[in-house]
Amino acid sequence: MTARSGHPAHRTTPLETIVPPPPETGTQFPVLDTLRAVGALAVLTTHVAFWTGAYTRHGTWGALLARLDVGVALFFVLSGFLLGRPYLLRAAAGLGAPGTGRYLWKRFLRIYPLYAITVALALGLIHDNRGASPGDWLTTLLMLDNHLGYGFPAGLTHMWSLAVEVAFYLVLPLLMLVGTGRHRPCRTLSPARVAALAAGMVAASVWWTLDGAGRVAEATTTGEPTEWLPAYLSWFAVGILLALLQVRQERRPTGQRPGRLASAVEGLARQPGVCWTLAGALLLMASTPIAGPTMLASSEPTELLTKNLLYAAVGGLVVLTGAFPDASSAYQRTMAAPLGRRLGWISYGIFCLHLPILHLVMWTTGWPLFEGRGPAVWALTVAISLVAAEAAYRVVERPALRLKGIRPGGWRSGASKKHVSTPTTGSSAR
């Protein structure tokens, strides 16, 4: 048995002898690793479907393919859960928040090196980006295209969601300060306060989608306000709420019965088949006109809101299946298989690189846009993306994370050095 997790000792697999997995400490969420791969492959698939014209060619099936952008919602719920949980866990133990400087440095190392390489590849090699000015390069490298321009350049259009996630990284310490308060002796976690924070995030998202984004769009000639963080706060809020329930379950004294809400949520988590069925039904609902058009035509604010709320529910249900680890569960044993987790470890590379690779596939084959060949394009894009992501994981991502102990400029811890076990695997959706 492992000392920290209480699960059976981990056996090294052939995949892990090539490149070791991220270090594991504290409570582990192996299902969530695999779900990261599900999210990345969903995003890849919806982009291939668009490029090959499947959205409009295949009726309901095409609409479902269009809605596989729900993978972004899955990423955001995962980030809310995995990044919010350490704050809640420390608050429940009466400790201060994790050090902000160290947290931001680790986020930078996790996200930026591969992002910068992807930007260089796309701006340097994709024909549509020829003539990009130094200002264009700087704007994209700083992830400001959604705010200062009209979207990301060719091969990088999917990075709008990464820009939103990075914005969430930056405001998370402040959000969790609101949700947990400043550390004081004997202060503990207030579920009502965290729930109020999540409710406020959802309310802000609803207002922004229905009114705020339109007001900003009228006041400025640049930027895409519907692709800014406020529009998606509800997705992160779902993850934070799941983290709250998981922390309370983990710290519940033996023999103490959970409250009604906690009991219902934990009971649903033990029925992953029900969760996936409900998520599928909601995604099917999102594939109807109530959630707006499947192509790039603008949606009405009410349609955008409907889509966002449905996606929040889908993401929450899917993440719920892995938020309460149970080593005896057949579902966890299946989802935590070495191949699935490995795909999760390289999922950020799949996400970053798949769109430049899709450009490469279409350019080298000479196949025209929107003219079919979806299965062939998908197979080629997946195969090349997996190889590229594996290489990026070995050469870029893992070496970068080895620098996390370096303190650029120095920082103060901002938290007690008393240990509270938190996960280091899959520490965010990316």
Image (tube, rainbow, N blue to C red):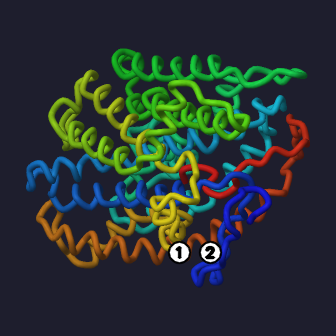
Q: Which percent across, then down, holds residue 295? A: 19, 44
- The three-letter amino acid code for the residue at tag 1 is Glu
Q: Residues within 10 Å of mark 2 (few under 14, many from 20)?
A: some
Q: Quadrant of residue 195?
A: top right
Position above or below: 324 against 312 = below
* Image quadrant occupied by the C terminus: bottom right
Q: Pick the residue in front: 40 or 406.
A: 40
Q: Is residue 382 left or right of residue 425?
A: left
Please report contact status of discs 1 and 2: CB closer than 8 Å, yes or no: yes
Q: Which residue is mark 1?
A: 390
Residue at 70% x, 31% y: name it.
Answer: 173
Q: Which percent across, then down, holds residue 139? A: 53, 45
Q: Which percent across, then down, holds residue 289? A: 15, 33
Residue at 48% x, 52% y: name it.
Answer: 133
Residue at 46% x, 29% y: name it.
Answer: 234
Q: Could you say which disc has been placed on residue 158 in the image?
A: none
* Image quadrant occupied by the N terminus: bottom right
Q: Which residue is mark 2?
A: 394
